């Protein structure tokens, strides 16, 4: 679960 959230935030940061 934590890894999924971390990946999501990382992806959002890269997208931004």
Image: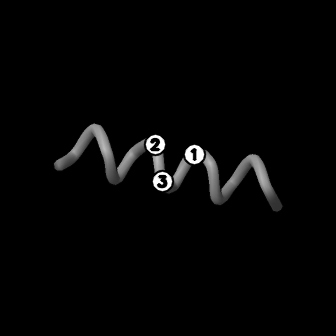
Residue at 48%, 53% in the rendered image: 9
Residue 1 placement: quadrant: bottom right
Q: Is residue 8 left or right of residue 6?
A: left
Q: Residues within 10 Å of mark 2 (few under 14, many from 20)?
A: few
Circle 1/circle 3 CB separation < 8 Å: yes
Q: CA distance from mark 2 to mark 1?
A: 5 Å
Residue at 64%, 59% in the rendered image: 5
Circle 2/circle 3 CB separation < 8 Å: yes
Question: Where residue 2 sits in the image (x, y, percent)?
Answer: 79, 55
As helix, strand or loop, the secondary structure at mark 3 comes to helix
Residue at 69%, 54% in the rendered image: 4
> Residue farthest to the top?
14
- Residue 7: which numbered mark, if any? 1
As helix, strand or loop, the secondary structure at mark 1 comes to helix
- Residue 9: which numbered mark, if any? 3
- Residue 10: which numbered mark, if any? 2
């Amino acid at each position: 679960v934590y890894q999924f959230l971390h990946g999501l935030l990382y992806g959002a940061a890269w997208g931004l």
